[in-house]
Amino acid sequence: MAIVVCTAMVGLASQAEAASQCGKASWYKMGTKTASGEKMNARALAAAHKSLPFGTKVRVENLSNGRSVVVRINDRGPFTGGRVIDLTQGAAEKIGMINSGVARVKMTVVGGKGKLSANCS
């Protein structure tokens, strides 16, 4: 029985690692509708991602200050090279990246069916 529990715990650790990705985030408040058809709300805790399914919840941690926020994917982007996620203004404020405009972040899927490739060291 102990072997089964240990094996299951190793599997969970691998899944958690595979659900995190690091890269650059930016923020935006343009447009009137999101790609999911929702009305754009710059104050919402939401984000744009190129491939995660709409509705996926992602914890985004600003690696320079340790602040994090959970956002819901409701739009597509970013469309600027080298960026992995676009946050709404409200989400960017929560993690302290309004003035810089761009921040290095760690993203971890915390809800939904989306998966990220692990690339954080």
Image: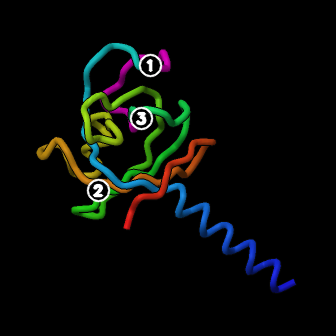
- 110 in relation to 121, above or below: above
Q: Nearer the viewer, residue 117 or 55?
A: 117
Check the picture and name the quadrant holding the C terminus.
Answer: bottom left
Closer mark to the observer between disc 2 and disc 3: 3
Pointer 1: what residue? 35
Secondary structure at badge 2 equals: strand
Residues under numbered marks 3 and 1 in contact, where contact means CB atoms less than 8 Å apart = no
Q: Nearer the viewer, residue 117 or 77?
A: 117
For residue 27, which quarter of the picture? top left
Pointer 3: what residue? 49
Q: Is residue 51 left or right of residue 64?
A: right
Q: CA distance from mark 2 to mark 1?
A: 25 Å
Q: Earlier in the sequence, mark 2 or mark 1?
A: 1
Q: Nearer the viewer, residue 68 or 81?
A: 81
Could you tell me which residue is drawn at 81 percent across and 84 percent down?
3
- 44 in relation to 109, above or below: above
Q: Residue 62: which numbered mark, if any?
A: 2
Magenta stretch: includes residue 37: yes
Residues under numbered marks 2 and 3 in contact, where contact means CB atoms less than 8 Å apart = no
Residue 10's x, y, as percent? 66, 74
Amino acid type, label 2: Asn
Q: Earlier in the sequence, mark 2 or mark 3?
A: 3
Could you tell me which residue is drawn at 29 percent across and 16 percent down?
31
Magenta part of the protein: which range? 35-45
Residue 94's x, y, as percent? 29, 48
Q: What is the residue that sits farthest to the left in this orientation? A: 99
Q: Earlier in the sequence, mark 3 or mark 1?
A: 1
Q: Nearer the viewer, residue 83 or 87?
A: 83
